[in-house]
């Protein structure tokens, strides 16, 4: 097992290098000069060549790209993501302040996705091809096809404005987390329920399920202990992939519910042309996503030993 | 003799493919969901083509009556500036369908080409392309889109580019897999033996037989691209006012949601209908073209 973990950690290194290259490459090689855009934004149109050259020098933009990349990657390695142009504070400090909110939202979104998706998929599988199956899969389908922001607005309209059960915005207490979490989790719930359904239908045809029933186990034991437990194995990988989607989805959800977080930080960074902020946040979220997937892979290998032996071979 | 035998093979192959296409069409037509999706998509396409000609009002005209609730006069009400929401939703279909089709095209062309090269040549080419694909897939696509928009500036065209680039690795991985399974089949060997040039084998014999998964992925991706694109416009990073774009329209009504729910929610319902339709058609095509086909394989 430790060999497998080490192997996966080593595989992470080239991916990390490539990701940092993508972030850096996109921000520094595409047309559009950060210094010029910054001056246009900050000083209202009049960009003198002298001021531009000065700022480019200040930002290190006149160095060769390789030097710029090495400086960027080297500082990122020790946690230095540069300084935000707008806030005049280190990007890492801004991220540290807001990371809790984003993580809280993504985790709560995941819990919602599982709480909605697993039972929906399971009941659909048990009553496969019946009216409930059609209804459950219909809900799942719509859930996966909805614009996140739209669903958030509808929830605000119904549960905050009309019923008054939850606040429409902010991040004060758990109450204010409910609507954003449901908004974020619903799309993932759709995908999870479809996967649970197909996996469960497959598992329910296995011999050990028939054996369980034949030896007189209660149907609930057959379904929960033998059925669901085995049907959930593919769901674990799916959850890892979904978590990336959830992290990315926080960008929109945080804006809809006016919650503080890294997603909103990126959006405000783009709108105010705060390049170091966007670069830092994007890199940070990508690394978190990779680490979550690593943990999921390890968990998966632990659940299903065939995988780690397959890797070693 | 053997050359003649091999030459006859493609004709038989063509006949077989034509037959299987007929069967696929019949399977598709029997799928009620897929047919419903196709009808919705066709209806939206007609609306998009006709655009302002069928809209009751000019989508950017200020009618002097702001935030009117839906009525016989204004089916979807009017927005904060007094523009007819129904007309804006109708004309907005042009923007969204364009966004979906163009960004998928932008992603599919390089994606398919890279996948074809990667799967056909193998070796170093494959290793290089595959590593790059893995890295891009390790990056959530909306995040990649955000970084690209940050570099290019908020604008609808840049959204198409950003979403398109995000879909490149999906095509590369899909096509590479299909090419690997096709490239060693006897008819490809035969095409090689009778001396077809490499590019001809790749395009006429290999790629042609990978079309099914490409069509399915493209249909599903159009819906996905519309979702991501409208989300970016909602954030203020895509279409800019006064463009009647569905995501932007939802954002414009957000501050008055409590009293004027129609401004934000009705354009979102339009997106939902298009995306559900794309997914229904995509899934229908998937099971019609090959019941065992899996996109995630």
Image: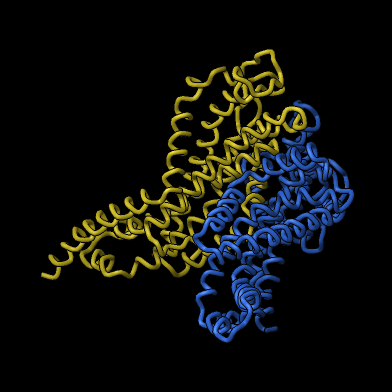
Chain colours: A blue, B yellow
- Does residue A159 sit above or below A48 in this rendering? below
Q: Which part of the image, by quadrant, shows the N terminus of chain B? A: bottom left
Front in this rendered view, residue A244 or A96:
A244
Q: Which residue sits furthest top? A: B64
> Does residue B210 appear in the picture of this structure?
yes
Residue B210 appears in which quarter of the rendering? bottom left
Q: Residue at x 67, y 84 (%)?
A: A1
Is A274 situated left or right of B241 in this image? right
Front in this rendered view, residue A56 or B206:
B206
Count the labels in the image: 0
Front in this rendered view, residue A144 or A37:
A144
Q: Residue at x 61, y 55 (%)?
A: A190
- Does residue A8 sit above or below A178 in this rendering? below
Query: What x and y, as percent, mark residue A132?
Result: 56, 57
Q: Residue at x 45, y 70 (%)?
A: B123
Query: What x and y, as percent, mark residue A201?
Result: 53, 69
Q: Residue at x 65, y 60 (%)?
A: A117
Is A267 situated left or right of A164 in this image? left
> Does residue A60 appear in the picture of this structure?
no
- Does residue A217 sit above or below A43 in this rendering? below
Q: Which residue sits furthest bottom? A: A215
Query: What x and y, as percent, mark residue A39?
Result: 77, 33
Front in this rendered view, residue B43 or B163:
B43
Query: What x and y, as percent, mark residue B130?
Result: 52, 64
């Amino acid at each position: 097992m430790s060999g497998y973990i080490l192997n996966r950690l080593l595989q992470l290194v080239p991916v990390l290098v490539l990701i940092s290259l993508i972030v850096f490459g996109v921000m520094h090689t595409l047309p559009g000069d950060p210094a010029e855009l910054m001056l246009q934004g900050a000083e209202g149109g009049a960009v003198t060549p002298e001021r531009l050259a000065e700022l480019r020098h200040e930002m290190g933009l006149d160095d060769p790209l390789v030097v710029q990349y090495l400086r960027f990657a080297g500082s990122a390695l020790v946690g230095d993501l540069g300084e935000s142009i707008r806030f005049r504070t280190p990007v890492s400090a801004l991220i540290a302040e807001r990371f809790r909110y984003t993580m809280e939202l993504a985790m709560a979104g995941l819990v919602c996705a599982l709480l909605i998706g697993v039972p929906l998929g399971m009941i659909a599988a048990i009553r496969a091809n019946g009216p409930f199956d059609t209804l459950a899969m219909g809900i799942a389908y719509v859930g996966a096809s909805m614009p996140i922001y739209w669903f958030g607005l509808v929830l605000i309209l119904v549960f905050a404005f009309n019923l008054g059960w939850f606040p429409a915005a902010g991040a004060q207490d758990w109450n204010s987390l409910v609507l954003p979490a449901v908004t974020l989790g619903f799309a993932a719930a759709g995908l999870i329920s479809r996967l649970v359904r197909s996996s469960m239908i497959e598992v329910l045809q296995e011999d050990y399920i028939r054996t369980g029933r034949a030896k007189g186990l209660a149907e609930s034991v057959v379904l929960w202990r033998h059925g669901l437990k085995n049907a959930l194995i593919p769901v674990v990988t799916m959850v890892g992939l979904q978590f990336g989607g959830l992290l990315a989805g926080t960008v929109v959800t945080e804006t809809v519910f006016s919650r503080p977080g890294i997603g909103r930080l990126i959006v405000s960074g783009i709108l105010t042309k705060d390049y170091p902020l966007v670069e830092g946040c994007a890199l940070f979220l990508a690394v978190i996503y990779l680490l979550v997937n690593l943990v999921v892979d390890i968990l998966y290998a632990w659940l299903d030993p065939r995988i780690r032996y397959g890797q070693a071979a | 003799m053997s050359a003649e035998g091999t030459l006859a093979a493609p004709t038989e192959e063509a006949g077989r493919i034509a037959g299987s296409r007929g069967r696929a069409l019949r399977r598709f037509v029997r799928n009620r969901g897929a047919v419903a999706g196709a009808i919705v998509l066709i209806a939206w396409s007609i609306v998009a083509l006709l655009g302002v000609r069928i809209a009751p009002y000019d989508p950017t005209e200020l009618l002097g009556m702001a935030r009117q609730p839906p009525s016989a006069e204004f089916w979807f009400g009017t927005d904060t500036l007094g523009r007819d929401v129904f007309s804006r939703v109708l004309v907005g279909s042009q923007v969204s369908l364009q966004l979906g089709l163009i960004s998928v095209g932008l992603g599919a062309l390089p994606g398919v080409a890279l996948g074809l090269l990667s799967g056909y040549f193998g070796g170093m080419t494959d290793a290089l392309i595959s590593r790059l694909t893995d890295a891009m897939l390790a990056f959530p696509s909306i995040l990649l889109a955000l970084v690209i928009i940050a570099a290019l500036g908020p604008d609808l065209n840049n959204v198409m580019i950003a979403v398109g680039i995000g879909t490149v690795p999906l095509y590369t991985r899909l096509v590479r897999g299909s090419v690997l399974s096709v490239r060693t089949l006897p008819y490809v060997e035969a095409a090689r033996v009778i001396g077809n040039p490499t590019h001809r084998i790749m395009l006429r014999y290999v790629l042609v037989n990978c079309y099914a998964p490409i069509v399915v992925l493209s249909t599903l991706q159009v819906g996905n691209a519309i979702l991501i694109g409208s989300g970016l416009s909602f954030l203020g990073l895509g279409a800019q006012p006064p463009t009647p774009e569905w995501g932007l329209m939802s954002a414009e009504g957000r501050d008055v949601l409590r009293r004027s729910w129609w401004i934000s929610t009705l354009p979102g319902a339009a997106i939902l209908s298009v995306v559900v339709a794309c997914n229904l058609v995509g899934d229908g095509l998937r099971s019609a073209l090959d019941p065992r086909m899996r996109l995630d394989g």
